[in-house]
Image (tube, rainbow, N blue to C red):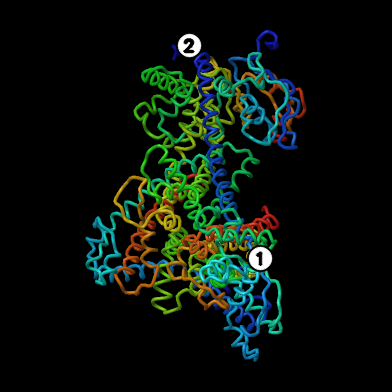
């Protein structure tokens, strides 16, 4: 038996089996071709990443020919439209990315204010409190939320949440723009709840039962056990879950395109309209544009920023979750 | 010099205890008294129900969804399965040490301080430090860790970890300490230390220990209960059980023919 | 070794009520979190259902249309060219004149009156005549779609005094209703038409076929590639730094924002390879790259769940590793792979941002016939309609969402059933 395996691996040693020589050789050859195909297809994922990185880099470099890197990264003014209207190439349009970053951060902060507590509490409930029956009822709710396309969330934000935020804030005397960061952020937060919750649920469930028993054996209540023992033990994994949530929040597009604004205000007031990196990418690339104008190239520069930011967040998060799993496996 | 149950009031009494995991009948009609300030050993082949019985005594089985307990278990005459009984209070009175050392991922100090902290047993920092020190001292760990109380508990050796878990349990000042094969993952030297500790602790606490080692039961316990396939086969003074067992199953187990 | 403390029981007993309250509070927070999620879900589905349900019916007006030969085919040749360019709007106008002889005298009134009926009425007549030229010369009763404003009025969305109708128009509509010439019928146009500037004629067939072609492309590319990559990584790849890198890369790719994949599609497929904008083929290719990590991850999980004993048994009988995988491991993992693929496809169906990047947001009336025709997709249609100012498009938007969600429900249920049916515990 060992020889057969060796023959397949090495492909040269003659087989001891009864199969005729030619057929055996053909089989070995076929398997090697198939194995090569399998290995090649596993490269597609790498090629995708490389493709993303290269195309973003390439177009960004062309963008930086027209707009200096310093002006892009530290400029406080974003108004790419001006350049187009006056039919000038690049130089006079303002491509300062700071207002977009602030807007993205503001909406992500609102979203995580919703998704963090809701996601963690529901994960704790599912992992520690829910009976199997309650779990079989509660878990699908989160799975359905996870399956709803973001364009639907966006429409819901415009249809229900934005008017509600506006009316209720005006009732208490606040000035609110119709496309507030708050409305978009809250809806995005709900969208992210299942992401945070499912990872946190896994992570909490992976905390060894013996730690819980240790606490119960001392007379700790369930909430004391969760708060003092389980959560601190699960902390790195929970950090990973939250980071993946943040990564999702800054990369989310449709909710903000539909429910947040287009104008780049530099503000941290969630009742104001702000714009985000993704909104501007969509704005820059819709409509009939020449492929080479700085306006379209700017979208790639924004894309590169977004890619780098999410890459860093994802890698830290994946590392945290992975380390954590290894510790308790 | 057999002391009949009437002369010493038992700390814990179990009457007609049955345990089911789903349909499996894990423990059948167990009657057992545990006397105060003694070490009672529960022995028997694996799967005999000895650990299950131990976990009934502080209602640890409540954590397992499919587990059902009926019968009557009393601590100082109070029914511990009474719905009015608070599990927090019960487990503060009946502490537990587990098979595998399970220190919390915290510092040595915080491990021992955790029980007193949640129960509000220390009125000041100084009082808490005093509790931590005396508990570690009683667990025979003080000398080894007094200079690194803020170090993570997971850095201790297995035997030290288990003594830390004992210190953690006695810091709450329970009346009974349940020990579920506390030495099964330890080397002989660490085991000897814990056995010596048990002997000291019985002055102040009532101890119930599950062990798979008959030698250990003979060394540390005053009373021994032998379980087999969910039945409590025999209970008596340790000397008697080991030298003159009444039931043939006990004899077979002790002489190494079953288990 | 003496303990100076009192017995702790009193202190513990005293702490119990406070701790019980804290416990109840904490438990409540968990339930509240789930409750909020549920409330949001119900609100979302309720609001969209409420908004969109109206789009499945359409107000129609009964007209007795005389297909006058002198108007439609004055030369009498029945030439399809003539028939398809004839003025059917005039026929409709004449039919309205039959009902309201007074109104058609003044030009302004005539325009106001014809505005009540959709321009689609003429298109539908043309379709009928082209199919059956024998109808010319006959008079027949047709139910013509009402204009979207009229539709909104009868659905109660617009109020009578909203200023959108003149007194005269309201009078005409009242008379039509009194004569039983107004009905609300199932809106089949919504499912058989492409997009349109006229809300009452706009349908989702174009978007559905665009989505279909894009999803098929996505499936054809990502399924074999994903499964093959997963087989290699799970069954054959050596465990070293390189495969570690591949694995991290795949996990990261699964969390890269979808809009970034759109940029890749724009730069690589449209810019570099020069493929057509707005084609479902390109959309499907981008979606495939996006779905690939998901399929690889679930396939690996399914393969990994097959116990090694089965593999070892096959190899022990003299099978090669490849044979053991092809004949034993892979078939056992198939249900899991299918489930994961369906879920990946469902996610791709709802994805929009990358399609915008590659220009699949154009206004396209014609229903695409193949993956190379310009097309939109279901979520694209939702987005376009959500942006349209006409009030009638709001209900179309919600209705398109309902259709999209219906597809997703069907796909996910299929996945759940597959999983239940073939669930195996090793």
- In the picture of the structure, the residue carrying the numbered disc 1 is C331
x then y, percent, for residue C231: 56, 66
x then y, percent, for residue A322: 46, 51
* Chain of the residue under label 1: C
> Is C270 located above or below residue C301 in the figure?
below
Residue C295: name its quadrant. Answer: bottom right
Residue A248: name its quadrant. Answer: bottom left
x then y, percent, for residue C73: 62, 86
> Is B152 located above or below residue A325 in the figure?
above
* Chain of the residue under label 2: C
- In the picture of the structure, the residue carrying the numbered disc 2 is C6
Residue lying at 64% horizontally and 78% vertically, measured from the top left: C127
**Callout 1: SS:** helix
Q: Is residue C299 left or right of residue A266?
A: right
Residue C224 visible, this angle: no
Residue lying at 39% horizontally and 53% vertically, measured from the top left: A313
Mark 2 and mark 1: span between their CA atoms?
68 Å
Residue B74 visible, this angle: yes
**Callout 2: SS:** loop
x then y, percent, for residue B84: 64, 20
Residue lying at 44% horizontally and 29% vertically, measured from the top left: B111
């Amino acid at each position: 038996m060992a020889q057969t395996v060796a023959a397949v691996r090495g492909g040269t040693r003659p087989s001891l089996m009864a199969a005729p020589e030619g057929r055996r050789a053909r089989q070995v050859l076929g398997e090697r071709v198939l194995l090569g195909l399998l290995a090649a297809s596993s490269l597609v994922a790498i090629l995708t990443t490389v493709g993303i990185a290269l195309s973003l880099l390439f177009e960004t470099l062309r963008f930086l020919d027209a707009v200096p890197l310093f002006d892009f990264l530290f400029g406080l003014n974003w108004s790419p439209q001006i350049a187009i209207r006056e039919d000038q190439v690049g130089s006079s349009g303002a491509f300062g990315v700071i207002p977009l970053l602030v807007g993205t951060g503001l909406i992500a902060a609102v979203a995580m204010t919703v998704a963090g507590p809701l996601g963690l509490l529901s994960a704790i409930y599912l992992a520690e409190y829910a009976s199997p029956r309650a779990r079989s009822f509660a878990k699908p709710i989160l799975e359905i939320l996870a399956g709803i396309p973001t364009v639907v969330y966006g429409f819901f934000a415009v249809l229900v949440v934005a008017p509600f935020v506006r009316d209720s804030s005006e009732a208490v005397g606040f000035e609110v723009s119709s496309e507030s960061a708050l409305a978009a952020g809250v809806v995005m937060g709900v969208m992210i709840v299942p992401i945070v919750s499912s990872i946190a649920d896994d992570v909490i469930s992976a905390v060894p039962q013996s730690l819980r028993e240790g606490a119960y054996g001392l007379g700790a209540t369930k909430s004391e056990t969760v708060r003092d023992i389980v959560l601190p033990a699960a902390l790195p994994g929970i950090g990973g879950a939250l980071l993946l949530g943040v990564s999702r929040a800054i990369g989310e597009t449709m909710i903000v395109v539909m429910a947040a604004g287009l104008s780049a205000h530099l503000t941290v007031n969630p009742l104001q309209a702000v714009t985000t990196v993704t909104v501007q990418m969509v704005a820059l690339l819709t409509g009939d544009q020449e492929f080479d104008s700085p306006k379209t190239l700017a979208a790639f520069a924004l894309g590169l920023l977004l890619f780098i930011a999410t890459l860093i967040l994802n890698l830290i998060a994946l590392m945290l979750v992975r380390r954590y799993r290894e510790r308790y496996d | 010099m057999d002391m009949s149950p009437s002369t010493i009031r038992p700390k814990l009494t179990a009457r007609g205890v049955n345990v089911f995991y789903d349909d499996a009948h894990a423990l059948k009609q167990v009657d057992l008294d545990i006397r105060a300030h003694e070490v009672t050993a529960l022995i028997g082949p694996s799967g005999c129900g000895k650990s299950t019985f131990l976990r009934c005594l502080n209602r640890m089985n409540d954590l397992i969804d499919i587990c059902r307990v009926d019968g009557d278990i009393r601590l100082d005459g109070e029914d511990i399965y009474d719905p009015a009984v608070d599990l927090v209070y019960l487990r503060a009175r009946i502490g537990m040490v587990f098979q595998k050392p399970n220190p919390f991922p915290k510092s040595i100090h915080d491990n021992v301080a955790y029980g007193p902290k949640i129960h509000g047993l220390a009125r000041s920092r100084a009082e808490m430090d005093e509790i931590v020190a005396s508990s570690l001292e009683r667990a025979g760990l003080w000398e080894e860790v007094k200079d690194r109380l803020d170090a993570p508990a997971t850095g201790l050796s297995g035997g030290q970890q288990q003594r830390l878990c004992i210190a953690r349990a006695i810091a709450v000042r329970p009346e009974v300490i349940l020990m579920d094969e506390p030495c099964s993952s330890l080397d002989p030297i660490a085991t000897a230390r814990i056995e010596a500790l048990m002997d000291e602790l019985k002055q102040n606490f009532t101890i119930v220990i599950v062990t798979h080692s008959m030698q250990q039961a003979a060394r540390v316990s005053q009373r021994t209960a032998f379980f087999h396939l969910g039945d409590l086969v025999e209970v008596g003074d340790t000397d008697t059980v080991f030298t003159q067992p009444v039931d043939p199953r006990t004899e077979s187990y002790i002489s190494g023919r079953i288990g | 070794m003496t303990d100076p403390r009192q017995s702790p029981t009193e202190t513990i007993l005293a702490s119990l009520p406070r701790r019980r309250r804290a416990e109840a509070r904490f438990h409540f927070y968990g339930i509240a979190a789930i409750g909020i999620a549920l409330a949001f879900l119900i609100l979302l589905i309720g609001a969209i259902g409420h908004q969109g349900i109206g789009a499945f019916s359409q107000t129609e007006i009964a007209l007795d249309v005389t297909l006058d030969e002198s108007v439609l085919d004055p030369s009498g040749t029945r030439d399809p060219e003539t028939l398809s360019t004839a003025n059917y709007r005039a026929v409709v106008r004449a039919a309205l004149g039959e009902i309201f002889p007074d109104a058609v005298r003044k030009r302004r009134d005539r325009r106001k009156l014809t505005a009540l009926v959709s321009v689609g009425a003429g298109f539908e007549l043309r379709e009928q005549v082209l199919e059956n030229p024998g109808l010319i010369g006959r008079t027949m009763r047709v139910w013509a779609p009402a204009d979207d404003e009229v539709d909104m009025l009868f659905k109660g969305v617009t109020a009578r005094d909203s200023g959108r109708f003149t007194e005269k128009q309201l009078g005409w509509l009242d008379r039509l209703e009194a004569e039983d010439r107004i009905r609300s019928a199932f809106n089949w146009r919504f499912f058989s038409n492409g997009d349109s500037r006229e809300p009452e004629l706009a349908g989702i067939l174009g978007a559905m076929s665009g989505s279909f072609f894009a999803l098929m492309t996505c499936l054809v590319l990502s399924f074999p590639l994903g499964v093959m990559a997963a087989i290699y990584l799970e069954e054959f790849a050596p465990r070293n730094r390189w495969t570690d890198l591949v694995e991290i890369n795949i996990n990261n790719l699964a969390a890269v924002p979808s809009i970034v994949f759109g940029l890749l599609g724009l730069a690589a497929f449209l810019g570099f390879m020069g493929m057509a904008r707005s084609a479902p083929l390109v959309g499907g290719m981008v979606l495939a790259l996006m779905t690939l990590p998901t399929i690889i991850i679930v396939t690996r999980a399914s393969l990994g769940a097959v116990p090694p004993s089965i593999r070892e048994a096959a190899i022990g009988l003299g099978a090669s590793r490849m044979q053991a995988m092809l004949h034993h491991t892979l078939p056992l993992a198939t249900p899991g792979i299918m489930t994961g693929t369906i879920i990946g496809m469902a996610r791709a169906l709802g994805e929009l941002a990358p399609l915008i990047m590659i220009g699949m947001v154009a206004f396209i009336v014609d229903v695409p016939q193949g993956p190379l025709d310009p097309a939109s997709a279901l979520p694209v249609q939702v987005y376009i309609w959500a942006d349209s100012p006409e009030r009638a498009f709001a209900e179309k938007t919600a209705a398109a969402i309902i259709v999209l969600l219906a597809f997703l429900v069907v796909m996910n249920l299929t996945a759940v059933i597959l999983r239940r049916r073939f669930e195996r515990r090793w």
